[in-house]
Image: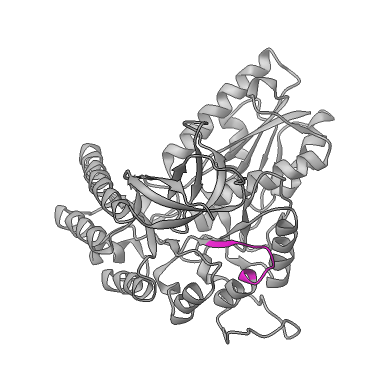
């Protein structure tokens, strides 16, 4: 069958979709770029916010409606919404052929075969404590790759549905991760991003290193820092990133690993969610404003060029004007390079869903816009400080907005636009002198070797 996947949500979902694409190709199916050309359409869903679920439900409804004219078309759902709703999804979306939860992505080729044989209403979800169906298949799709090292989450923040839909934390064995990364590098990958909901929790809940594994040359004893060291040593790997972080994971060993391992990029996505101690406590985030800022200081004291991005929720139940101003102040003090701002929306089954959603929607929108405008100013200032510097840019290829120019990313994960240069191909490093800056983008000229 010809197939296409539509992906909503986080990088974990992007990685899951890539794995399913590789599995479907291995089963003899053919990926296509246009939905109209597809006989099989799979929607990979997100449940973190109500808006994300609404988008996926709307898309599924439209797809299933096309089956009136294309009765042989198959429509499937995977991801967090399938896990959350279970069998109820078939009542919500008449005509849906199959649904697969977050820990069973590897089942999709088998369910497609059953659907082609005439079965309907096929569902596979997982118990939250079972070992996940880890899929290490990759497509041959470029020079950067995501590698999942930690699945699930044990933090139980008051607003967050992730532990319910992605299950308990499970860390993959280090040896398995290293084998996957070595294979990727042999196939041309030069940059790897290690993924986990709280990625620095790697190895805290189950054994990931055993006695037969070589000891850490740098004396790292914490499982995650030891993994960074081992991955950074993979021959041919140019860059190593990881996401998402938690302030409790910014330990002395983590800071040392980032500062002494050349492959590790000086960039981290470190969600803060609020700058108010009162709101952070209600959110059950497990740190204070001071804890968070101390983590920022530790990183930048060791690496002054360290780039930080974050997530912030506005309008959490009980958030006052003073709480909001505390968030604005923290964001200015942390001097984030970028920030993703979200309006609070209650998620079913979470503790916060039982609380009064007492911040009016108009006020949520106002606070959201204020933080976006603040961040534009911070982003412009941060990028302007890079004008005149030379950045090592991992070349991605022609820019999406102007194919006559090329783009890549700096170690700080900033988009850099430059004129193509003889000898540069995707996957290579270019030294680019920055000549101009915008809030989200840098522009420059290649420095000849």
Left or right: 446 in relation to 62: left
In this picture, is 176 found above or below 316? below
- Of residue 15 and residue 338, the one placed in the foreground of this image is 338
Residue drawn at x 56%, y 67% is 263
Left or right: 235 in relation to 316: right
Q: Position of residue 248 (x, y in %)?
A: 42, 73
Q: Within the image, what quadrant is residue 230 found in?
A: bottom right
In this picture, is 29 found above or below 307? above
Q: Within the image, what quadrant is residue 295 found in?
A: bottom left
Residue drawn at x 79%, y 28% is 1
Residue drawn at x 37%, y 47% is 346
Check if residue 198 falls in the magenta segment: no
In this picture, is 110 found above or below 94? below
Residue drawn at x 74%, y 51% is 137
Q: Quadrant of the C terminus?
A: bottom right
Left or right: 281 in relation to 253: left
Q: Number of numbered discs present?
A: 0
Farthest residue to the front: give it. 448
Inspect this view and state whether residue 101 appears: no
- Of residue 444 and residue 376, the one placed in the foreground of this image is 444
Q: Position of residue 60 (x, y in %)?
A: 58, 28
Inspect this view and state whether residue 250 appears: yes
Check if residue 232 falls in the magenta segment: yes
Range of magenta residues: 231-241
Q: Position of residue 436 (x, y in %)?
A: 33, 45
């Amino acid at each position: 069958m010809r197939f296409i996947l539509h992906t909503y949500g986080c990088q974990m979902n992007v990685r899951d979709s890539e794995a399913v694409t590789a599995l479907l190709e291995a089963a003899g199916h053919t990926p296509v770029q246009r939905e109209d050309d597809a006989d099989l359409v799979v929607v990979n869903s997100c449940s973190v916010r109500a808006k994300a679920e609404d988008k996926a439900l709307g898309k599924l409804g439209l797809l299933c409606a096309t089956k009136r004219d294309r009765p042989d078309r198959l429509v499937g759902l995977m991801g967090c919404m399938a896990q959350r709703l279970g069998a109820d999804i078939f009542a919500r979306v008449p005509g849906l052929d199959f649904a697969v939860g977050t820990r069973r992505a590897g089942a999709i080729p088998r369910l497609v075969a059953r659907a082609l044989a005439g079965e309907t209403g096929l569902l596979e979800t997982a118990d939250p404590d079972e070992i996940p169906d880890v899929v290490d298949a990759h497509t041959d799709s470029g020079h950067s790759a995501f590698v999942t090292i930690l699945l699930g989450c044990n933090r139980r923040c008051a607003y967050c549905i992730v532990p319910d839909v992605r299950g308990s934390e499970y860390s993959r064995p280090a040896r398995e991760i290293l084998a996957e990364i070595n294979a990727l590098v042999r196939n041309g990958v030069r940059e790897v991003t290690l993924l986990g909901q709280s990625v620095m929790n790697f190895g805290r809940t189950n054994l990931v290193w055993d006695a037969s594994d070589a000891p850490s040359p740098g004396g790292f004893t914490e499982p995650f820092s030891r993994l960074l060291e081992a991955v950074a040593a993979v021959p041919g790997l140019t860059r190593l990133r990881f996401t998402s972080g938690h302030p409790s994971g910014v330990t002395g060993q983590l800071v040392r690993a980032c500062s002494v391992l050349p492959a590790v990029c000086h960039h981290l996505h470190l969600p803060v969610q609020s700058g108010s101690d009162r709101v952070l406590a209600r959110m059950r985030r497990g740190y204070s404003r001071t804890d968070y800022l101390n983590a920022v200081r530790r990183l930048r004291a060791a690496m002054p060029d360290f780039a930080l991005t974050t997530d912030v929720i506005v309008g959490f139940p009980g958030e006052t004007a003073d709480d909001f101003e505390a968030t604005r102040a923290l964001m200015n003090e942390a001097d984030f390079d970028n920030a993703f701002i979200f309006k609070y929306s209650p998620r079913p089954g979470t503790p916060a869903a039982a609380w009064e959603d007492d911040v009016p929607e108009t006020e949520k929108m106002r606070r959201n816009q204020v933080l976006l405008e603040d961040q534009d100013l911070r982003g412009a200032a941060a990028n302007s400080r890079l004008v005149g510097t030379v950045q090592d840019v991992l070349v991605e290829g022609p820019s999406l907005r102007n194919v006559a120019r090329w783009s890549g990313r700096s170690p700080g994960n900033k988009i850099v636009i430059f004129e193509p240069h003889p000898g540069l191909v995707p996957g290579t490093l270019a030294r680019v002198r920055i000549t101009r800056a915008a809030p989200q983008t840098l522009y420059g000229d290649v420095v000849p070797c």
